[in-house]
């Protein structure tokens, strides 16, 4: 069958004709070519936050799936949490990790500056004050 004019203009060359994996490969190299020091979001977290807010605001409220569907949001959050290996999960998932971090943090303060461990009267007074606030 002879080629039509439309078929003969189609090209086997160019970015769009590449398979998706090759396109991603090329795109990744472009991002890597910019030094970390010049990546604006890496240097300016506030700029990144502004961009995120701006992007979110550009979607109409009725199309924001998480704001409209809270169970979808919690499902996504659980899925995200499960993707982290157990040894790196938050303290709520790993009490031993929390205890270890607490001990490590406490040890970083010199003994003479640990006010409650050095001054039991101060600790008792703080405890009473905390209890008074909660009972009101």
Image (tube, rainbow, N blue to C red):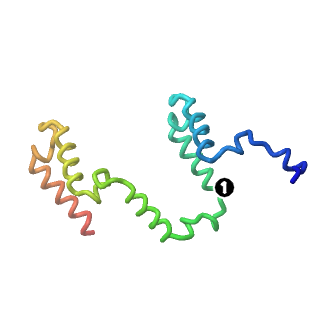
Give the image location of residue 95, x and y in percent: 22, 57
Outermost residue, right direction? 5
**Camera-side residue of 136 and 25:** 25
Q: Residue at 75% of width from left, 42% of height from top? A: 12
Quarter of image, res 62: bottom right
Q: How many marks?
A: 1
Q: Tell me: 25 left or right of 134.
A: right
Q: Name the residue under label 1.
A: 58
Q: Quadrant of the C terminus?
A: bottom left
Residue density around tag 1, few if under 14, some if 14–19, many if 20 or more, within 10 Å: few
Q: Tell me: 18 left or right of 41.
A: right
Q: Tell me: 93 left or right of 30.
A: left
Give the image location of residue 89, x and y in percent: 32, 54
- Asked if 17 appears above or below 1 in the picture, the reply is above
Q: What element carries label 1?
A: loop
Q: Residue at 15% of width from left, 55% of height from top? A: 125
Q: In which quarter of the image is the N terminus?
A: bottom right
């Amino acid at each position: 069958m002879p080629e039509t004019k439309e078929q003969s203009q189609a090209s086997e060359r160019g970015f769009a004709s590449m398979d998706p994996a090759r396109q991603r490969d090329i795109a990744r190299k472009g991002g890597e070519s910019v030094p970390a020091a010049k990546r604006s979001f890496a240097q300016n977290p506030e700029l990144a936050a502004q961009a995120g807010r701006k992007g979110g605001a550009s979607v109409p409220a009725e199309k924001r799936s998480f704001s409209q569907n809270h169970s979808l949001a919690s499902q996504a959050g659980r899925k995200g949490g499960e993707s982290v290996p157990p040894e790196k999960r938050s303290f709520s998932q790993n009490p031993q990790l929390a205890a270890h971090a607490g001990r490590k943090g406490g040890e970083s303060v010199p003994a003479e500056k640990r006010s409650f461990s050095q001054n039991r009267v101060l600790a008792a007074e703080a405890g009473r004050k905390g209890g008074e606030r909660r009972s009101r």
